[in-house]
Amino acid sequence: MAHKLGRFLQLFFGCHARPDRSFYFKGKQFPICARCTGELVGMISGILIAVIWGYPRFYIVILLMLPLVFDGTLQKLTSYESTNMRRLFTGILFGIALIFMFIYFHVTCFKIAAEILKLFSDDPQKIERALDIFI
């Protein structure tokens, strides 16, 4: 079972699972690398944060994503080598932001659908009230 879950996580994140970029517990390698582990922790945390406190403004979401983008890009294009703790930390921030992005996407889809429905509705205010319930 654990092996199947590990394989699923590798596929879900598109993870290389390199041994030198992974954490170990009791001598066994995590199924996903440090950065993907951070993203997973961040996604779970992001759900909890969104439920408890809501989600931040869009520019904050972008700012939360930037550390991973910069760290990963710098590592890819130069001889700079990130650390597993930095990969974990930037992955957590990115994972949190990713959940918030899904929320923004969801809200945007609802707003677009509401605007389309208003075009064909006899009572556009009814659509507005329904939208207020869902968003």
Image (cartoon, rainbow, N blue to C red):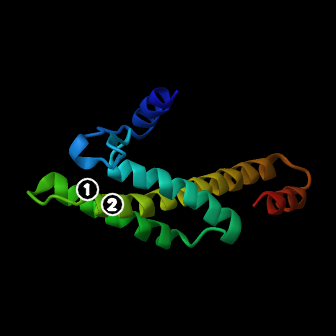
Residue 1 in the image: state x and y as whole percent: 52, 27
Disc on res. 117: none
Which amino acid type corresponds to the residue marked 1 in the rendered image? Gly
**On the image, numbered disc 2 is attached to which residue?**
68
For the question of whether residue 98 can be seen, the reply is no
Residue 108 in the image: state x and y as whole percent: 63, 56
Q: Residue at x 56, y 60 (%)?
A: 45
Disc on res. 72: 1
Tell me how far mark 2 sits from mark 1, CA to CA.
Answer: 6 Å
Residue 4 in the image: state x and y as whole percent: 48, 26
Looking at the picture, tell me which residue is in the foreground, 125 or 29: 29
**Would you identify the image quadrant in which residue 73 lies?**
bottom left
**Would you identify the image quadrant in which residue 64 lies?**
bottom left
SS at circle 1? helix
Q: Are marks 2 and 1 in contact (CB under 8 Å)?
A: yes
Looking at the picture, tell me which residue is in the foreground, 13 or 125: 13
For the question of whether residue 121 can be seen, the reply is yes
Which amino acid type corresponds to the residue marked 2 in the rendered image? Leu
Q: Residue at x 25, y 48 (%)?
A: 21
